[in-house]
Image: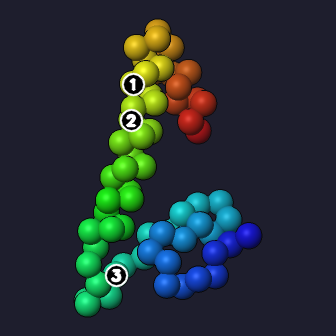
């Protein structure tokens, strides 16, 4: 189900995430911290697979 909460900064809309701009009075640090943590986790998982000898092409196919 799409997220109809228009106040969410990163709403899931069915098949993708939408990143919405913050208002001028809002601090972007929380949204950036969540995005950075998510990216770091994915990089860690890919790195672990590469270190185990999995081919990068296989990892990319799996992620897509």
Classify mark 1: residues with Cα within 10 Å, few (<14), some (14-19) or many (20+): some
Q: Which mark is residue 22?
A: 3
Q: Earlier in the sequence, mark 3 or mark 1?
A: 3
Measuring from the top left, give residue 45's x and y in whole percent.
46, 30
Q: Which mark is residue 43?
A: 2
Which residue corresponds to mark 1?
47
Instruction: Check disc 2 and report its element: helix, strand or loop.
Output: helix
Residue at 56% over, 36% down: 63
Residue at 43% over, 17% down: 50
Residue at 31% over, 63% down: 32
Measuring from the top left, give residue 39's x and y in whole percent.
39, 46
Residue placed farthest to the top in the image?
53
State the image quarter where residue 40 is shown.
Answer: top left
Asked if the residues shown at circle 1 and circle 2 are in contact, with their CB atoms under 8 angstroms apart, the answer is yes
Could you tell me which quadrant the N terminus lies in?
Answer: bottom right
In the image, taking residue 21 as reference, residue 57 lies left or right, namely right
């Amino acid at each position: 189900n799409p997220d109809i909460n228009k106040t969410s900064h990163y709403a899931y809309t069915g098949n993708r995430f939408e990143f919405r701009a913050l208002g001028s009075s809002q601090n972007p640090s929380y949204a950036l911290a969540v995005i950075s943590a998510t990216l770091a986790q994915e990089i860690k998982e890919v790195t672990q697979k590469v270190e185990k000898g999995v081919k990068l092409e296989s990892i990319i196919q799996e992620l897509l």
